[in-house]
Amino acid sequence: MASRGVEGIIYVEPILTGELANIINPKIVKKWIESITHFSEAKFEIEFVPAHLDSTWKKPMTATASYTGFDEENKMFKYKFEFEAPMDYGEIGALLVQNKLHKERFIKKIDLDLDYGDLLIFNCESWVHSVKDDTSRRIFFTDKSYLPSETPAGLKSLREEDLESLRGDGTGRRESFERIYDYDTYNDLGEPDIKPDTTMGRPILGGKEHPYPRRCRTGRDIITRTGRDKIPKEAESREHLDFYQFYVPRDESFADRKVATFGTMEILFSIAEALKPSRLEFHDYSSAPIETNKSRFEKLLEYLNDKWSDLNHLEKVLKVVVPKLLKDLYNNAQTVKRIHNAQGKEDAGKPHSWFRDEEFCRQTLAGINPYSIKLVTESEWPLKSKLPCEIYGPPESTITKEIVEKGINRHGLEGFITCDEALKGKRLFMLDYNDLLLPHVHIIRKLTGTTLYGSRTLMFLMSDGTLTPVAIELTRPPIDDKPQWKHVYIPYSDYKEKTMEPPEAWLWKMAKAHVLAHDSGYHQLISHWLRTHCATEPYIIATHRCLSKMHPIHRLLFPHLRYTMQINALARQFLINAGGIIESTFSPGKYSMKLSSDIYAEQWRFDREGLPADLISRGMAVEVKDPSAKNGVRLKLTIEHYPFAHDGLVLWYAIEDWATAYVNYYYPPPPPQSYPQPNLVSTDEELKAWWHEIKTVGHADKKVGWPELRNQEDLIGIVTTIMWVTSGHHSAVNFGQYTGGYLPHRPTIARTKMPNETDQNPDEVPKEWEAFLKNPKDALKNCLAMDSQSSKVKTTLNVLSSHSQDEEYIGDKIEFAWEAEPAIKDAFLKFKHKLDNLGNDIDSWNKDRDMKNRHGDGKVPYPYELLKPFSGPGVTGKGVPYSISI
């Protein structure tokens, strides 16, 4: 029988990932060096699977790939194989790969030279476990995408087998080499097994009592303790696990360069913790410890250099990989030195501009939390709480029409405007944290070193498109037999900046500090963590469990889902855990995550996570008829110069157009006037299972707000929302956090109550008031974070605001599977062109001085660039990655 020769090469990347998290320990690197020398001993067994079953050749075709050297051009190891295939063997649709070495390996791709000039490439980009861990073979498909109903006969069983291998059965402890995607509650935030006292126990998030999205199941041991009522019965042990050792499916772990970026956080936290509070002043922060860590890196480099001669053919590999990674680590560690200048140079013309009312309001439109400001409608006036008055006191707000009119007319620039006119003209806006926070005030005030109020902040839209504050109302519900207390603070601007400021001016500043602490907590816990990181994890799990890697929707979403599970696992390890960064530096303290659960239950809905729906729900945009617009309707912003919404809508519509072209290619609508036929979307069993699992398992506690999935339009809306949340939404609330490192600009915690807060006797003069009158500046300082808290926040925000060296920006590089289809490639290039134009347009808009909300004032002179699609590495204040990767 005639045959044809087939040659192939397996490309394996030299990866440090697991050990890099502890790279400052030379013993770890030595261990890696010892293990990497076994590359030359590695062999891979490969079986070739025909896509179709019409071949008369029934015998399995196999080959063994052996190590042949290091490819300097591709910077990868090469393993070659050869075999003879019958001429009628047909199209190869899949490969089954088994790693015979005792260590896992990261296979980048497998090239097949089919002897007649064609090169078939399997873009694997996946870890392949060792036979010592698991004897099963890995399945890799070509870049051609298939709907389930269109799967070639030879691949149908493999398609299901591959999906089944990722699901697990909900039992057993997950091992680091596994790729199992399964669901669990957030039952590992507390640490009762590490600290037996009940203060480290935390409620389980997920379920009827505390609704929450699900996270990836790890299968660690459940803690069993008797007589400790405050420790949840199903709490999972944390087991003293080291950095990066919370289980995530193997392919969800960071690539080396991203480890270098985020792994630096562990080093920086260690530096911050080692410093005494007296060393945490802005001007001399951490100069000595940086040198200490630099010497560690230098010693490690020396150790590696000493080992070059022992590594023979791997010398070139290490010279390529290790120095770059160490350079990344060291460069990222230098960010500690910049913390004290988190907002750049002080503007000599406008000292302390971070306290200016204009900047306070502008941040609601162009700061790191542009998701809270809302329009005050005529139907909402007068403002009134919806909470039960028998628990929280009188519901009526004390912000009256007279207070509003005094506030909006105090500048004398607009002519006299009544409150009714402001409401009718859609010129009153609000940050409303009253009903969200009041139910938590009682328990949070029992904590040491923090306090809380319910708050409302009213703002007025000036004729130049900027906002000015009108009033702040702070409310304390009845507590410990004390009646409800509430007070309205109004801007005090009748003084010159360099003169002695009266008490009213300092009270206004303190009220703003409390509101900013509320907004910071909402931003970090809700706008950032809950609505992006946390809500996305179920989408990732369901995508891998329900959509084959051959499925076009899996391939559309895949770049938007990379690395998120790893960053979320790290967050559970030391950011949102008991005693972690969030609890120790934000006002809600140990109740932070419970607060996020309550707000998830009350506010979160998938059908409002898309940008247009979100803006409409807050009254920040309305739909208007426009014959020239798509579907005859366009979105009109209530505040024209709202930088986040303005830029965000351009990005949203670009993503929507890309998703539309993609979906309609793989799910073509039936031709007009054709006979009725089933919709390809509604008959896609994998797709239906995916959406069902997201709704009923991943977000099992939410019963409302889920769109139907019946046709192409529904699917486009769903995937566009997911793609937006992971890219534009996350970038807008994350990569501007560097400026938040300067705590007076954006406090994360208010530690003391307002000095004029009284208890039962309104004529009583509180002791806090007397101290405040003596030194109001010290009173404000004491209200803000302590130095130790400040150092943690600044360190965290600097790292979280950084782009890694290998950041994958939306629309930058085309995925292999997209490039394989000419129509999809063309649609992607149009998408990329729109993003290039958006970047250029943002540059132009930032030069337009009439768009005043795009520029900060004084200490924050930077333009609004958070949704500019592309960026270089480091802290740049711009760049939109595909995924939530930090």
Image (cartoon, rainbow, N blue to C red):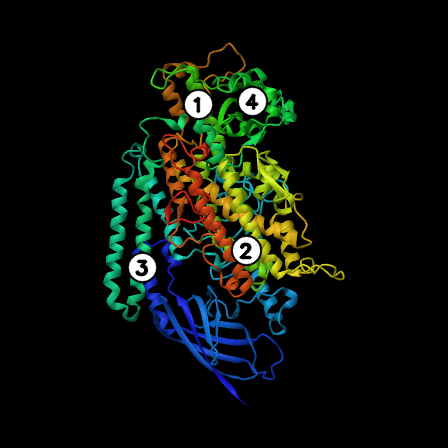
- Front residue (pair 135, 770): 770
**Distance between the alpha carbons at the discs numbered 3 and 2:** 32 Å
How dense is the environment of label 2, judged by Cα within 10 Å: few (below 14), some, or many (20 and up)?
A: many
Label 1 Cα crowd, 10 Å radius (few <14 / some 14-19 / many 20+): many
The kind of residue tagged 1 is: Met
Q: Earlier in the sequence, mark 3 or mark 2?
A: 3
Look at the numbered disc 1 and give the secondary structure of its residue.
helix
> Real-space Cα distance between discs 4 and 1?
22 Å
Q: Which residue is mark 1?
A: 510
Q: At x 64% / y 49%, what residue is drawn?
A: 695
Q: Nearer the viewer, mark 1 or mark 2?
A: 2
In space, the residues marked 4 and 2 are separated at their CA atoms by 49 Å
Left of 807 or right of it: where is 235?
right
Pointer 2 residue: 557
Residue 265's spot in the image, x, y percent?
A: 38, 46
Mark 4 residue element: loop
| Labels 1 & 2 near each other (Cβ < 8 A) | no
- Whichever of callouts 4 and 1 sits on the residue coming sooner in the sequence is 4
Q: Position of residue 664 (x, y in %)?
A: 62, 58
Q: Which mark is residue 322?
A: 3
Q: Which residue is mark 4?
A: 479
The residue mark sitting in front, 4 or 2, is 2
